[in-house]
Image: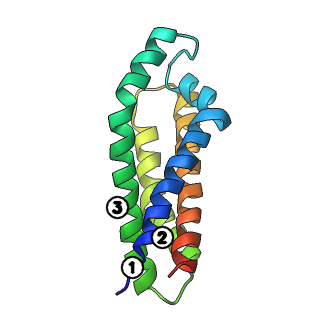
Amino acid sequence: MEINYWAVLVCGVVTMITGSLWYGPLFGKKWMEAMGINPMDVDTKKKMQKGAMPLYGIQFVLSLFTAYVLAHYIEGWEDVSGLENSLWIWAAFVLPVIAGNAMWNNNPTKAKWTNFCIGAGYQLVNFILFGLILGMWK
């Protein structure tokens, strides 16, 4: 089984770019509101930014791992495209986990649904991009 490591690396970088857009200008304010974070609170914002760098590194490594494992599935399951393969993986494994996390926390119902939609949407976009990148760049 041949895995294109350049494609896996590109997937990791794409995830970081998507995340910065998704949780920044696109849905950042809505996400912070759902998480109970006041975007105008400068002290909280600085504290979050200070602890974020190590988390970005961990997230990057986890994204590489996800893309690497998905590349194995795409390579081994040749009956469907990389995109279809990644959508099945997202629907069967990622979506239920995000839904469970959203349902079983103590947030108000509106915040639960907001977190679910933002998180599931972000992962859906990532898996679509992963499927396209890994499927086409073999």
Find numbered disc 1 in the image and state the secondary structure of the residue it sits on: loop
Q: Residue furthest front?
A: 6
Q: Residue 65, labelled with which disc?
A: 3
At label 3, the amino acid type is Phe
At label 2, the amino acid type is Ala
The residues bearing labels 2 and 3 have C-alpha atoms spaced at a distance of 12 Å
Q: Nearer the viewer, mark 2 or mark 3?
A: 2
Q: Residue 137, image x and y in percent?
A: 54, 78
* CB under 8 Å between discs 2 and 1: yes
Q: Residue 17, image x and y in percent?
A: 56, 48
Q: Within 10 angstroms of label 1, few (less than 14), some, or many (20 or more) residues?
A: some
User: What scheme was used to colour the molecule?
Assistant: rainbow
* CB under 8 Å between discs 2 and 3: no
Sequence-wise, which precedes: disc 1 or disc 3?
1
Task: Say whether residue 27 is left or right of residue 123.
Answer: right
Q: Within 10 angstroms of label 3, few (less than 14), some, or many (20 or more) residues?
A: some
Q: Residue 3, labelled with which disc?
A: 1
* In the depicted structure, whether residue 45 falls above or below residue 24: above
Q: Residue 107, image x and y in percent?
A: 46, 26
* In the depicted structure, whether residue 131 falls above or below residue 1: above
Q: Which residue is mark 2?
A: 7
